[in-house]
Amino acid sequence: MNQDIIIPAIDVQTPDRLNFIIEELACEASMVKVGMELYYSFGEKILDDLSEKELKIFLDLKLHDIPNTVGKSCKALGKLGIQMLNVHAAGGADMMSAANESFKSENEKAKLIAVTQLTSTSQKMLNEQLLIPGTILDCVLRYAELAKKSGLDGVVCSAMEAPYIKKELGPDFLCITPGIRPSGADHNDQKRVMTPQQAMANGSDYLVIGRAITEATSPKKAFQDITQSLSQGI
Ligand code: C5P
């Protein structure tokens, strides 16, 4: 099993916990996810600290604003030397195209990914709070299609939707899947959840795993246990 497939989400706020997790994971993971919690707590310096440890960075800032603002912001983020960035597909095709063009003008090799529906969104929430009719699967598929037409490299979705996206949009269109929980683990706020094994079987390209790794007594052992169970197919 290629351990690059697991992207730990380093969702922490204190320097002590951050340093501990970096030390534990630096020799295990190839790429880590820097989300809002970490980025807003430590600022841009965190990206240099992680790069110094030779960790690749998925900057999960989920941009969503008018096309001009997102486009110009993505140009700025393209200068940071990250390997992956995301925007919300709900911002629409013009916003995604502007983001893609600006980001890649600064960082040609990096991937731009669209968040479809958050893995914390349930069917009921989609229909009754977001007021989007139809099924989650259909919404995710349509957002994914729009992201592909806008030139993006893939989507963030639940592993439940990954096989349908691969079938409709092809094997090279990336499916990055959070909402991953080892069997029996607490789902917390996540609603569309799968185990690492189910996610792999469904064709996920990358598994984003946060609390199951970062809140473990030994994040290193939690990471190793997951990769080992995947390589053994259990
Ligand atoms: O702790 P847990 O494994 O639930 O963390 C999931 C991570 O993935 C969090 O950092 C969250 O912000 C992120 N994420 C998500 N659902 C999305 C996109 C990102 O859970 N659709």
Image (cartoon, rainbow, N blue to C red):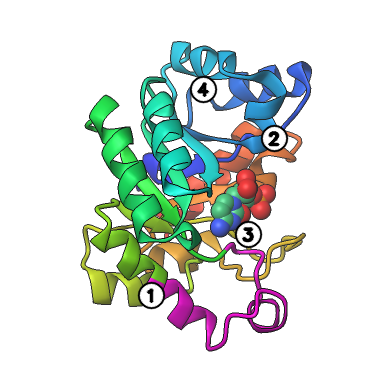
Quadrant for residue 57, please give it.
top left
Q: Which residue is mark 1?
A: 142
Is there a contact, CB below 8 Å, between mark 2 and mark 1?
no
Which sits earlier in the primary sequence, circle 4 or circle 2? 4
Instruction: Read off the magenta span.
Output: 118-142
Above or below 159: residue 101: above
User: Tag 1: residue type?
Assistant: Arg
The amino acid type, in three-letter code, at marker 2 is: Glu
N-term-proximal mark, 3 vs 1 = 1
Residue 150's place in the image compared with 202, above or below, is above
Disc 4 target residue: 26
Assess disc 4: are there few (<14), some (14-19) or many (≥20) residues with their C-alpha within 10 Å of its C-alpha: some
Marks 3 & 2, CB-CB < 8 Å contact? no
| Mark before the other along the chain sequence, 2 or 1 | 2
- How dense is the environment of label 3, judged by Cα within 10 Å: few (below 14), some, or many (20 and up)? many
Distance from disc 1 to disc 4, alpha carbons, whole Å, reads 37 Å
Looking at the rendered structure, the secondary structure element under dot 4 is loop
Calculate the distance from the C-alpha at mark 4 to the C-alpha at mark 2. Answer: 20 Å
Could you tell me residue 14's position as x and y percent? 78, 22
Q: Does the Cβ of the disc 2 residue fall within 8 Å of ligand 1? A: yes
Give x and y (percent) for residue 12: 72, 31
The residue that label 2 is drawn on is 37
CA distance for labels 3 and 2? 20 Å
- Give the vertical position of 28 relative to 8 (above or below): above
Give me the C-alpha separation between circle 2 and circle 1: 29 Å
Q: Is mark 3 within 8 Å of ligand 1?
A: yes
Do we see residue 107 in this rendering? no
| Secondary-structure class at tag 2 | helix
Q: Is residue 99 left or right of residue 159?
A: left
Mark 4 and 2 residues: CB-CB less than 8 Å, in contact? no
Front position in the image: 229 or 149? 149
Comparing labels 3 and 1, the label whose residue is closer to the camera: 1
